[in-house]
Amino acid sequence: MLLLWALAFILVLQEQDILAAADPVSMVPGSLERGSWCNEHTIHERLDIIEEKVIKTVEHLESEVKSLLNIISETTSNIPTAPGTPLIDIFDDAS
């Protein structure tokens, strides 16, 4: 799920860059084969760049989440409790 959110976020951010970089290709009449190959090649290059950025961003986000989870677990284990306060198991069904 995190991967999908990161991907959506990056695609939204990249939309402006892609639209700004997508210059129309001027083609000479009669050179359709070359023009379509160039367009496909350019699109694949841009997709490769976006894929690389997405992978790096997801790796960065994963490390940040792990770091935050470690901080949270360290913080909760270090919370002082008043002497004589019973510990409550929130997962215990006994009511």
Image (tube, grey):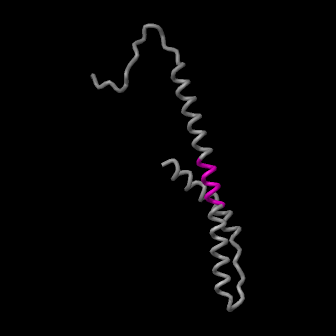
Residue in view at x 61 percent, y 58 percent: 51
Position of residue 7 relative to residue 67, above or below, is below
Position of residue 21 relative to residue 87, above or below, is below
Q: Which residue is farthest top?
A: 84
Residue 80 within the segment the image draws in magenta? no
Residue in view at x 64 percent, y 78 percent: 37
Answer left or right for 77 relative to 47.
left
Residue in view at x 66 percent, y 66 percent: 45
Considering depth in this image, is 42 or 79 the residue closer to the camera?
A: 42
Answer left or right for 92 relative to 33.
left
Q: How many numbered callouts?
A: 0
In x, y percent, where is residue 15?
63, 63
Q: Which residue is farthest bottom?
A: 30
Position of residue 5 relative to residue 42, above or below, is above
Answer left or right for 76 relative to 56.
left
Question: Magenta segment, principal secondary structure?
Answer: helix
In x, y percent, where is residue 89?
37, 22
Q: Quadrant of residue 92?
A: top left
Q: Quadrant of residue 16?
A: bottom right
Q: Which residues are magenta?
A: 49-58
Q: Which residue is farthest left?
A: 95
